[in-house]
Image (spheres, helix red, strand yellow):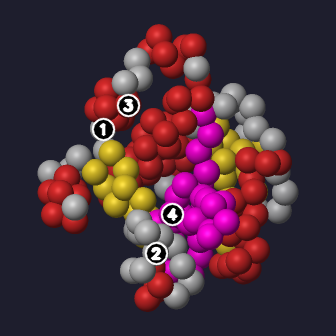
Amino acid sequence: MRRYLALLETTFLTHTLPAWAANVGKRLTKAPKVLLTDTGLMAHLLGVDAAQLAKDPTRAGPLLESFVAMEIRKQVGWSKATPILLHFRTSAGHEVDLVMEVGTRLVAIEVKAAATINEHDFRGLRLLAEATGKRFHRGIVLYAGSQSLPFGPKLYAMPISALWRLGATA
């Protein structure tokens, strides 16, 4: 199995996100997240087409998460900060899609396909903020809506289009 995963990553079909842990040694033992780099291929493999997405928008979640992760990975390639991309998952199953570690600071991103969000969508970000204390710089929920909204100290909801507006100013 490892050989196949290595082959998929070598041919740029997948990208592996290591798990975030305060202890760098523990990162090696936690399960990584494997993302398909091509969301069109992912949609095909999942048997999802435009008609199915129109009927059931919840099926867009994994596609959007992978798309956003790959866009951020591209931006990391030219960023002066050069963050390390990781993901966060607790033993209770709470997760954060992307954690960017720059030195000692952490910026966490959760991706939601919904056009509206609520406090519940920030649960994983809040858990990470509690676990990391002062290291937690900012938590962002990227969503399919159009407004940027504060959701508490260091927590924000932003439209997915912010990926390109923010990247242009970095």
Q: Amino acid at mark 1?
A: Asp
Q: Answer few, some or many: residues within 10 Å of disc 3's Cα (few below 14, many 20 plus, some between 14 and 19).
A: few
Report the front residue among 170 and 147.
Answer: 147
41 left or right of 158?
left
Q: Earlier in the sequence, mark 1 or mark 3?
A: 1
Q: CA distance from mark 4 to mark 1?
A: 19 Å
In the image, residue 32 lies in the stretch drawn in magenta: no
Q: Earlier in the sequence, mark 4 or mark 1?
A: 1
The residue at 47%/11% (across/down) is: 51
Q: CA distance from mark 4 to mark 2?
A: 10 Å
Report the front residue among 3 and 106.
Answer: 3
Q: Answer few, some or many: residues within 10 Å of disc 4's Cα (few below 14, many 20 plus, some between 14 and 19).
A: many
Circle 1 sits on which residue? 38
Report the front residue among 95 and 138.
Answer: 95
The residue at 66%/31% (across/down) is: 114
Q: Earlier in the sequence, mark 4 or mark 2?
A: 2
Circle 4 sits on which residue? 87
| Tag in front: 1 or 2 | 2
| Mark number displayed over residue 46 | 3
Q: Earlier in the sequence, mark 3 or mark 4?
A: 3
Q: Indicate the quadrant containing the N terminus: top left, top right, bottom left or bottom right.
A: bottom left
Q: Secondary structure at mark 4?
A: strand
Report the front residue among 164 and 133.
Answer: 133
Locate residue 159, reporting x and y percent.
64, 36
Locate residue 15, reporting x and y percent.
31, 55
In the image, residue 96 lies in the stretch drawn in magenta: yes
The answer to which quarter of the image holds residue 154 is bottom right
Q: Amino acid at mark 2?
A: Lys
Circle 2 sits on which residue? 30
Locate residue 80, reporting x and y percent.
41, 66
Locate residue 83, reporting x and y percent.
44, 68
Q: Which residues are magenta?
A: 86-113
